[in-house]
Amino acid sequence: MTGSVLANIHIILVGTKHPGNIGSVARAMRNMGISHLRLAAPQCSINQESYRLARSGGPILESARRCRSTASALRGIGLVAGTSGKTGGNRRHASPPHALAPRLIAQAATQKVGILFGPEDTGLVDGDLMLCGTLIRIPTPPDARSINISHAVMIVCYELFLASLVRPPERVPKLARLEQVEAMYIQLEESLRRIGFLNEKTARHMMFSLRRLLGRAGLEETDVAILRGIARQIAWCAGRTGNPSLPVSPQVEGR
């Protein structure tokens, strides 16, 4: 069972700048039985240095998918976990790898799970974090938070491998696809703006908070349909009070 569960784990590197790091990541993945690598908008190419550092991870480099953007690299992924070494603000709800690994492995039993790692110098930016249903932070001393990307991948993959060895039976929801969830968030934000709950100053912060809250819940397709129905009803009521900027009706979607 371990192999089949890990086959649904996808390591996604965003904006990687050094070929050697891609090779080292492939080696770490191979050591922990994870084989799917996606490169989102990479700033370098896989080269001889990559293969030299990959060692037995060469086949992972050969099958790695190169994608034009983070969003395209996340197509088909059910649950996305983003990594961040920064603290506070929109990153304050991050969990250590060992605490989150059982949930990720349980989800991988039924659908694809993506682990997102940012560029070597900046890490994931807010736009990438917005696409993540949950966040991972590797605990370090406050004065040494910067971790080499291949080391970070190794730590996360190690915890995933351990969690895959013994997995208690549980009901695992089939999460809505990322595309469905993103469409829901867009509709929800538009409706909340209509009633004045969000404005230009608060919208970004509040939507981050809503994404963290709903991301922890693990939204299935029926949940997304209900939330879109609520958003549609909000917009319809706003239209009745004299602010009809969207064509809406009072019917709930997804029924």
Image: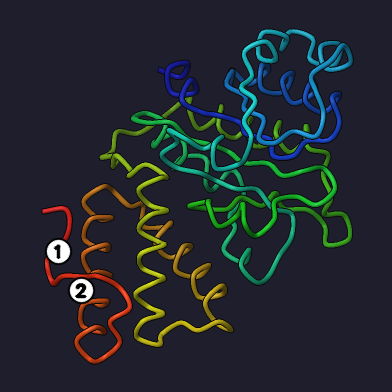
Q: Splitting the image into 4 quarters, where does residue 109 fall?
A: top left
What residue is pinned by disc 2? 233
User: Which class describes the residues within 10 Å of circle 1: few (<14), some (14-19), or many (20+)?
Assistant: some
Residue at image location 78% in from the left, 36% down from the top: 16
Q: Is residue 241 above or below residue 162?
A: below
User: Which class describes the residues within 10 Å of circle 2: few (<14), some (14-19), or many (20+)?
Assistant: some
Nearest the eye: 30 or 65: 65
Residue at image location 24% in from the left, 83% down from the top: 239
Residue that sits furthest to the bottom in the current view: 241
The reply to whether callout 2 and callout 1 are in contact (CB within 8 Å) is yes
Rendered image: mark on residue 99: none
Estimate the spatial distance between the alpha carbons at disc 2 and disc 1, rounded to whole Å: 7 Å
Query: Left or right: where does residue 12 sit relative to residue 57?
Result: left
Residue 245 in percent (x, y) is at: 33, 78
Helix, strand or loop for disc 2: helix
Rendered image: mark on residue 252: 1
Residue 17 in percent (x, y) is at: 84, 35
Residue 220 in percent (x, y) is at: 28, 48
* Rendering colour mode: rainbow
Nearest the eye: 190 or 229: 190
Q: Give, as a three-letter code, the residue at label 1.
A: Val
Residue 168 in percent (x, y) is at: 35, 34
Q: Is residue 2 above or below residue 217?
A: above
Nearest the eye: 189 or 100: 189
Residue at image location 79% in from the left, 15% down from the top: 54
Query: Left or right: where does residue 210 sit relative to residue 62?
Result: left
Q: Splitting the image into 4 quarters, where does residue 151 fall?
A: top right
Q: Splitting the image into 4 quarters, where does residue 71 fall?
A: top right
